[in-house]
């Protein structure tokens, strides 16, 4: 059975990708596989891999809870209308997603967030990794146009800038 694989992280972009993946799964009559990649602390760049067994188990439980919250946030009490399977996999997001969507008939759906120059230096793009390494088609979902308006309002509130009444029209 073909499957639509989507990565979630809790960000607005990943929730938009989840909704798009559910729509694609309905159109294709495919199974929807929702994947949350996780890593214990200290295993990233410059880490020392010094987590104990209890810490790893706690991180795994936290990842399962985060996946449940993401699904509840995205779909609420209703479900997407397709066969749904959720997975938490230990590893970097790009590598985990590419590994979960191995078959050429699969579809991999990833969100593309707005990324500034500093963020590109610190954290590589999951979408770019998937586009370069996936054996199946990759659908990238751009951020919502409302996200820019949300970030602008958040900046204005953080700096306590007055609202321009012309923006309300």
Image: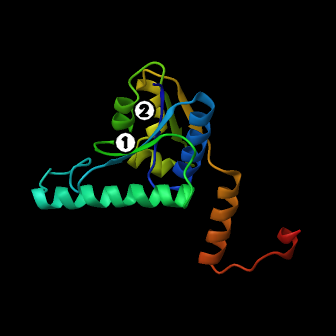
> In the figure, is residue 66 to the left or right of 45?
right
Q: Residue at x 23, y 54 (%)?
A: 40
Q: Which mark is residue 93?
A: 1
Mark 1 or 2, which is nearer the eye?
1
Q: Is residue 108 above or below residue 68?
A: above
* Proximity of marks 1 and 2: CB atoms separated by less than 8 Å: yes
Q: Residue at x 66, y 64 (%)?
A: 150
- Judge the density around disc 2: few (<14), some (14-19), many (≥20) Cα neighbours within 10 Å: some
**Distance Cα–Cα, label 1 vs label 2:** 9 Å
> In the figure, is residue 68 to the left or right of 39?
right
Mark 2 residue element: helix
Q: Is residue 10 above or below residue 23?
A: below
Quadrant location, the N terminus: top left
Q: Indicate the position of residue 78 as horizontal and vertical percent values.
A: 57, 56
**Can I make out residue 52 in this image?**
no
Q: Which residue is mark 2?
A: 129
Q: Indicate the position of residue 36 as horizontal and vertical percent values.
A: 38, 48
Mark 1 residue element: helix
Q: How is the image coloured?
A: rainbow
Q: Indicate the position of residue 100 as horizontal and vertical percent values.
A: 37, 32
Q: Residue at x 34, y 30 (%)?
A: 99
Q: Nearer the viewer, residue 18 or 167?
A: 18
Which comes before the other along the chain, label 1 or label 2? 1
Q: Nearer the viewer, residue 123 or 32?
A: 32
């Amino acid at each position: 059975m073909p499957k639509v694989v989507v990565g979630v992280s809790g960000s607005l972009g990943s929730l938009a990708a989840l909704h798009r993946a559910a729509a694609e799964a309905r159109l294709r009559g495919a199974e929807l596989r929702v994947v949350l990649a996780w890593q214990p602390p200290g295993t990233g760049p410059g880490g020392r891999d010094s987590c104990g067994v209890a810490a790893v188990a706690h991180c795994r439980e936290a990842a399962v809870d985060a996946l449940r919250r993401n699904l509840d946030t995205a779909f609420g009490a209703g479900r997407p209308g397709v066969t749904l399977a959720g997975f938490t996999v230990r590893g970097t997001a790009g590598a985990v997603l590419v590994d979960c969507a191995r078959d050429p008939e699969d579809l991999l759906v990833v969100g593309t967030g707005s990324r500034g120059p500093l963020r590109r230096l610190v954290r590589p793009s999951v979408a770019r990794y998937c586009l370069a390494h996936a054996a199946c088609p990759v659908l990238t979902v751009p951020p919502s146009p409302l996200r820019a308006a949300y970030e602008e309002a958040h900046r204005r509130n953080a700096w306590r800038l007055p609202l321009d009444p012309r923006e309300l029209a």
